Amino acid sequence: MYKQSLRRAVATTCVALLLTATFVGAQNQDSPLKITRPEAGERTNNRITPTANLDRAAAFQRVHRDPENALESKSAPRRTPGISMESALARRRQAARPAATLQSFGTGGGDIFEIEPNDQVAQGVSLPVNIFGEISFNGDIDFFAFEALAGQQITIEPFATRLGNSLLIADILLFNSTGDLLARDLGDGNNDPLIRFTSPDDQVLIAGIGDIEDFGGPAFDYALNITRGVDVDEVEPNDRIAQGLPDLPVTIFGEIADIDDIDFYSFIATAGQTLIVDVDSEVLGSRLDAEMNLIDPETGTEYFYSDQFDGDDPRFNIVLPYTGRYVMGIGAFNGNSTGFYRVNASLVPGAGAPIITALTRLSKKKLLVTGLEIANKAVVEVNGRERKTKLIGPGTLRAKIKMKTGDVVTVINPPDDRRSNPLIVQ
């Protein structure tokens, strides 16, 4: 499976590299580091999950753990069933089974609910993901299967003790697809557990979460964050000169400290790779109404902008058009909020994503988009906004839009919103 995926990824990369030769950036001579909001205003997107309602210290605990300021131990009454850790682990190992199907590799899962039953066959998820779930009954354990890439660190972090109203003291585990235990960590009532694991191979892994004493019920809820990459702290000032990042994937821990603050981060990537960006702010309890974009720092071209996707939190994926340096910017929509954020940015193979090869203006309000891997019900986006689209032939879309030179066009494929490379209207 992975050899085939890699061959497709190489083919997609070659296509994107060819596109680079014909890709023309917008002629923006202003400061290249800025966020340009669309004229249509804020996108409406209601949150489908609850929020974790954390403060900054709790949200950043995995990188800024302070033993002197540990959370108070839970005082709720608990029974002691006398189950040995060895027997509990044996049951968990026996139950761990990979999902029949996994979610799209190139989009990221965002904020989702667990789907029962997932105690015998793991629920498939796409990284990065925040899973809101519940250990529903005594002995319950929830499993989630995902694809890991060789050499990339996986971080599994539950929010349970930090939720305040949850009775769950988490037991988290990581298995391979044959049920071999790779890592385990236990909460202690003061802190939630944490697993960091670097996979030596491309493989399917299974994360499990249960209660350390095998209890469960309506009050045993959790939010489980699973991401790729190392953790990085924001370093100010980064509002005029972008903070350089190590090789992606990374999770950035930062803050919009005042209403005029914008944080920029730069990274190196290759044409044809898919970039996945997922902002966690509102979902963790931050008051920040975040916006995020992707910029070519040489020309100032804004390839994508997102203000809301998971509730008020931005998230997007996009096939990168050139090999070189990119910049991501994060700020507050309309400069009307402040607060902390966590941003996960990762690069995965571009296999399976649509590729735009040409744009043709048919009239002032009609655009012809041609390309590869375009699905039957694909939708044309202009500056990140969906437009009325019709498939008129294999790999050919017609969009109804009032367009202007410099507009950025992408295509998204259903059902997972896998996005293409960007092209600029000339």
Image (spheres, rainbow, N blue to C red):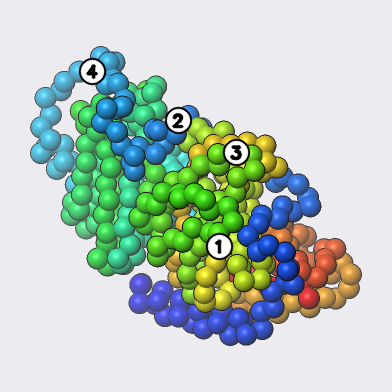
Q: Point out the image quarter for the C terminus.
A: bottom right
Give the camera-side residue of 185 and 426.
426
Q: Looking at the picture, how far across and down is residue 32, in whole percent?
A: 65, 64
Sequence-earlier tag: 3 or 1: 3
Work out whether mark 2 precedes mark 3 in sequence or the reverse, and give the earlier one. 2
How many angstroms separate mark 1 from mark 4 (CA)? Answer: 50 Å
The kind of residue on which mark 1 rests is: Val
Q: Quadrant of the N terminus?
A: bottom left
Q: Which element type, helix, strand or loop, lies under badge 1? A: strand
Per the image, the residue denoted by label 3 is: 258
- Relative to 228, 294 lies left or right: right
Residue at image position (83%, 67%) is 404
Q: Which of 108 and 137 is in front in this view?
A: 108
Say the numbered circle drawn on residue 91: none
Mark 4, other Cα within 10 Å: few <14 / some 14–19 / many ≥20: few
Q: Disc 2 marks which amino acid?
A: Asp
Residue 300 appears left or right of 62: right
The residue labelled by disc 1 is 327
Would residue 156 be seen by someone viewing this image from the given angle?
A: yes
Task: Give above or below for 255 relative to 296.
Answer: above
Mark found first going from the N terminus, 3 or 4: 4
Q: Circle 4 sits on which residue? A: 78
Helix, strand or loop status at disc 4: loop
Query: Nearer the viewer's eye, disc 3 or disc 4?
Result: 3
Secondary structure state at the residue bearing disc 3? loop
Please identify, in this view, whether the residue under mark 2 or under mark 3 is nearer the observer: 3
Q: In this view, does 295 lie to the left or right of 61?
A: right
Residue assigned mark 2: 55
Marks 4 and 2 sit apart, C-alpha to C-alpha, by 27 Å
Give the label, 3 or 1, closer to the camera.
Answer: 3
State which tag comes first along the sequence, 4 or 2.
Answer: 2
